[in-house]
């Protein structure tokens, strides 16, 4: 079994986002951390899915109260 050419893999690893550029090992680390971060986000959303509707409803009510541009009833 032949080993891969690690130097070639490092040279081929590039990330460019706007003015930000990463090349080599930092690019590989950024890519791996992005995958781990997205997997964690999906896992948290899957665990929070049953209560997500309640949270969104309460957040909508809170935003309406904080906004305060609604008319109030006068007794």
Image (cartoon, rainbow, N blue to C red):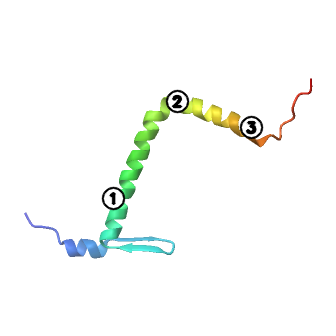
Q: Nearer the viewer, mark 3 or mark 1?
A: 3
- Location of residue 56 with respect to 22 vertically, above or below: above
Q: CA distance from mark 2 to mark 1?
A: 30 Å
Left or right: where does residue 63 sit relative to residue 19?
right
- Location of residue 47 with respect to 38 vertically, above or below: above
Quickly name the residue at label 3.
64
Left or right: where does residue 61 sit relative to residue 53?
right
What SS does tag 3 mark?
helix
Left or right: where does residue 51 sit relative to residue 4?
right
- Location of residue 34 with respect to 19 vertically, above or below: above
Q: Which is more N-terminal, label 1 or label 2?
A: 1
Quickly name the residue at label 2.
51
10 Å crowding of disc 3: few (<14), some (14-19), many (20+)? few
Quickly name the residue at label 1.
32
What SS does tag 2 mark?
helix
- Residue in front for this viewpoint, 72 or 36: 72
Where residue 24 appears, as percent x and y from the top left, is 31, 73
């Amino acid at each position: 079994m032949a080993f891969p050419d690690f130097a070639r893999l490092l040279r081929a690893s590039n990330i460019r986002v706007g003015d930000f550029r990463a090349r080599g090992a930092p690019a590989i680390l950024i890519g791996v951390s992005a995958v781990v971060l997205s997997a964690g986000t999906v896992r948290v959303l899957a665990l929070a899915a049953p209560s997500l509707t309640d949270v969104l409803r309460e957040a909508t009510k809170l935003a309406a109260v904080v906004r305060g541009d609604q008319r109030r009833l006068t007794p």
